[in-house]
Amino acid sequence: MPSADSIFNAFVTILVTIDPPGLAPLFLALTKGMNRSERRQVGLRASIIGFLVLALFAVAGAAILSVFGITLPAFRVAGGLLLFFIAFEMIFERRQERKEKSADTAITRDQIHNIAAFPLAIPLIAGPGAISATVLLSGSMDGLAAQIVLVGVILVCIALTYLVFLLAERVDGLLGQTGRSILTRLLGVILAALAVQFVADGIRALVLA
């Protein structure tokens, strides 16, 4: 059974990489013209798909890596660098701009019929950063009980994301531009520190291997 610190670190890492407050304005933009019931359905479906994707990597992340011949320490270094890049974007507010471009691209393409699957579930909820963080965390949690706990942590994070979708209009109005900027930068600093820890652990494992 993982320690309380490990569970808390997993929760913070996954929640920060998903970034529910940052998804609120994008959710509003993607569901423009929909009524409250339709928005609720889109948000629920996107949350379920996002959870299933992350849960898959939480349970079978190591097996997926082994298929490609990638060791966990190597992925830990690569994933940590990716998370650090995401943190850099968050601190300097470049991530939101990139997410908005993804949303705009999806809206203008005629072949996109279901925004719940794309781009909401993938890549906005279960994006490269969240998937990388999930695989890294699954590698540090051994045993069935630890994996169940990790899936539970993911479920809580997705539930919070869905709650933000339900309250998107209020959250966006409450935070405002200044509030979103401060929160994004604060979460970015926390993620950067966690990313450095992932890289350090990976390098140590590679050297000792």
Image (cartoon, rainbow, N blue to C red):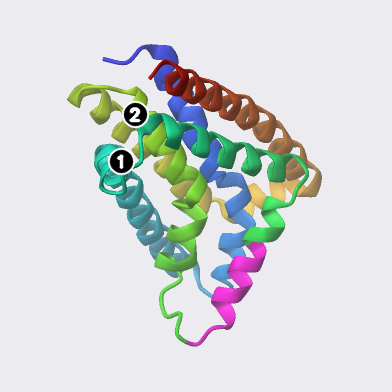
Q: Residue furthest right?
A: 178
| Residue at horizontal 62 percent and vertical 59 percent from the top | 99
The kind of residue on which mark 2 rests is Gly
In the image, residue 129 lies at what x, y percent?
A: 51, 45
Q: Which residues are magenta?
A: 100-110
Q: Which residue is mark 1?
A: 61
Q: Is any atom of residue 33 visible in this view? A: no
Identify whether 120 is placed above or below 202.
below
In magenta stretch: residue 125: no
Q: How many marks?
A: 2
In the image, residue 54 lies at what x, y percent?
A: 35, 46
Q: Is residue 30 left or right of residue 95?
A: left
In the image, residue 203 lies at what x, y percent?
A: 51, 23
Q: Which residue is mark 2?
A: 139
Q: Is residue 26 left or right of residue 7?
A: right
- Asked which quadrant contains residue 97, the reply is bottom right
